[in-house]
Image: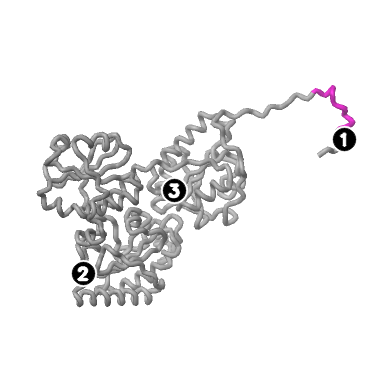
């Protein structure tokens, strides 16, 4: 259900805990087939069946409302049309591959599995079943007229859609390899092939189609390349290439590793996108200096993690930096979650502190806020790598107790000067020389 999912009392209190802990909206007892990057290709793309696939996020209210209807439709269509679901929050690479921008997104995979159609109908089981049957009718008619033989192999369709065009596969040689790959900050997937090898010929259109998609999705940060190992024997022997095709993954500062995933476009893209999110820089840790920082960070991410650090006079710059260091480490560790990260000084945003139940004591403190639901969870353990890791791990499994944000929305955020990175200075108090003051003037209120 996700940390901020609604717990439903199904069978009394016993099942409530299960629903809070469950991250998925579906279980193996439903007729909905759970799809992941591991089984998607085999179950959907290589199947002769018609598929309806829902891409959802466990924390999304519309998805939670669709769940019972989707299950009902799956049961009604059992044995006729396959009905699946992808947790696209967990498997972002799979959602990204099909251009999923919002939840829930429903796609129909018909006779040409490489061209999924968007489902635009109603969200009731009746509407879903009607759409499935009408898509099934056109799939059967297509077969009858010989237009398509059900599953069109990825090879043929990627050539048809221009995917066989090798323009985005980078050719590498003994001479160009080191300066392009080893000195690069980008991630490289390199295929070593032989022109006479049948498996290499089968892989070629898939590799080419994947190269184009990966280039677009990662803005060129993950590159697909090819080396003719029969010509570039220095490279082939350096990397111990024994069979073809062999695919290796190169990342800066790491030894190359073998790619051992599937050989279809979707498998290759999914792995490339995983590598991309692993190698992405950690998210920014921003100081709350005005309302804009809070709004843009918390609205754009499923969760925003907010730390309230002690006053600079209590810790000095060194103490504050060590807290920020711990947060940066955690932001890096959890970067695949795509959360936002913020901090402020005790007292600078007192209304925000009060709305998160922090107010006035116990610094450093930390809260994780879901801005869509206006709920938050508080760090109960220590403000240390171990304590924060425990806290965030529980959240990522959908556990942990939550409370509504005080006032039901973000309070007023003060505009403050950003920290200058220095130790704080005590305010200087001028000594007042009373001999210059005419005490009779003090009665007059000049404010």
- Residue displayed at 15% across by 43% down: 228
Taking the image as shown, residue 346 lies to the left or right of residue 14, namely right
Mark 2 vs 1: CB contact within 8 A: no
Judge whether residue 255 is colored magenta: no
- Residue displayed at 48% across by 36% down: 324
Say what secondary structure mark 2 lies in. loop
Residue at the limit of the structure toward the left, as seen here: 196
- Of the image marks 2 and 1, the number of the one nearer the N terminus: 2
Q: Quadrant of residue 165?
A: bottom left
* Image spot of residue 216 (x, y percent): 34, 51
Badge 3, how many Cα within 10 Å: few under 14, some, many 20+?
many
Range shown magenta: 433-441
- Of the image marks 3 and 1, the number of the one nearer the N terminus: 3
Say what secondary structure mark 1 lies in. helix
Compared to 446, does 336 lie above or below?
Answer: below
Give the labeled residue for mark 1. 443
Taking the image as shown, residue 109 lies to the left or right of residue 7, namely left
Q: Is residue 30 visible?
A: no
Give the labeled residue for mark 2. 150
Say what secondary structure mark 3 lies in. loop
* Disc 2 versus disc 1: nearer the observer: 2
What label does residue 345 carry, if any?
Answer: none
* Disc 3 versus disc 2: nearer the observer: 2
Magenta stretch, overall SS: helix
Q: Is residue 375 visible?
A: yes
Residue at the limit of the structure toward the right, as seen here: 440
Taking the image as shown, residue 255 lies to the left or right of residue 346, namely left
* Disc 3 versus disc 1: nearer the observer: 3
Judge whether residue 440 is colored magenta: yes
Q: Nearer the viewer, residue 231 or 47?
A: 231
What label does residue 339 carry, if any?
Answer: 3
Badge 1, how many Cα within 10 Å: few under 14, some, many 20+?
few
């Amino acid at each position: 259900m996700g940390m901020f999912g609604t717990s439903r009392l199904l069978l009394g209190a016993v099942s409530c805990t299960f629903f809070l802990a469950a991250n998925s909206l579906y279980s193996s007892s439903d007729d909905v087939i759970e799809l992941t990057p591991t089984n998607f290709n085999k179950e959907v793309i290589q199947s002769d069946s018609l598929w309806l696939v829902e891409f959802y996020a466990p924390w999304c209210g519309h998805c939670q409302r669709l769940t019972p209807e989707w299950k009902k439709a799956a049961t009604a269509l059992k044995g006729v049309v396959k009905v699946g679901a992808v947790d696209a929050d967990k498997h972002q690479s799979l959602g990204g591959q099909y251009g999923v921008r919002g939840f829930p997104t429903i796609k129909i995979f018909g006779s040409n599995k490489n061209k999924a159609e968007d489902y635009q109908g109603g969200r009731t089981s009746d509407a879903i079943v009607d759409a499935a049957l009408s898509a099934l009718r056109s799939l059967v008619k297509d077969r009858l007229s010989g237009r398509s033989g059900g599953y069109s192999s990825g090879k043929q369709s990627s050539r048809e859609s221009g995917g066989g065009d090798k323009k985005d596969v980078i050719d590498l040689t003994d001479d160009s390899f080191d300066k392009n790959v080893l000195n690069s900050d980008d991630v490289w997937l390199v295929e070593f092939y032989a022109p006479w090898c049948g498996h290499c010929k089968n892989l070629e259109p898939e590799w080419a189609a994947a190269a184009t998609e990966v280039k677009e999705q990662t803005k060129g940060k993950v590159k697909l390349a090819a080396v003719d190992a029969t010509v570039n024997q220095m490279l082939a022997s350096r990397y111990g290439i024994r069979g073809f095709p062999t695919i290796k993954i190169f990342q800066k500062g790491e030894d190359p590793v073998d790619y051992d995933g599937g050989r279809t476009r979707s498998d290759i893209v999914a792995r490339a996108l995983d590598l991309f999110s692993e190698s992405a820089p950690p998210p920014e840790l921003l100081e709350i200096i005005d309302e804009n920082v809070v709004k843009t960070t918390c609205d754009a991410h499923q969760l925003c993690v907010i730390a309230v650090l002690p006053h600079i006079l209590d810790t000095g710059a060194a103490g504050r930096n060590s807290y920020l260091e711990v947060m940066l480490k955690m932001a890096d560790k959890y970067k695949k979650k795509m959360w936002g990260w913020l901090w402020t000084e005790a007292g600078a945003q007192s209304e925000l502190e009060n709305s998160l139940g922090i107010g006035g004591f116990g610094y450093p403190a930390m809260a994780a806020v879901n801005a869509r639901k206006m709920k938050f969870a508080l760090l109960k353990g220590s403000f240390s790598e171990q304590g924060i890791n425990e806290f965030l791990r529980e959240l990522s499994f959908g556990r942990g107790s939550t409370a509504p944000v005080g006032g039901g929305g973000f309070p007023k955020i003060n505009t403050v000067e950003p920290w200058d990175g220095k130790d704080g200075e005590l305010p200087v108090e001028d000594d007042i020389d009373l001999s210059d003051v005419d005490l009779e003037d003090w009665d007059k209120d000049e404010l």
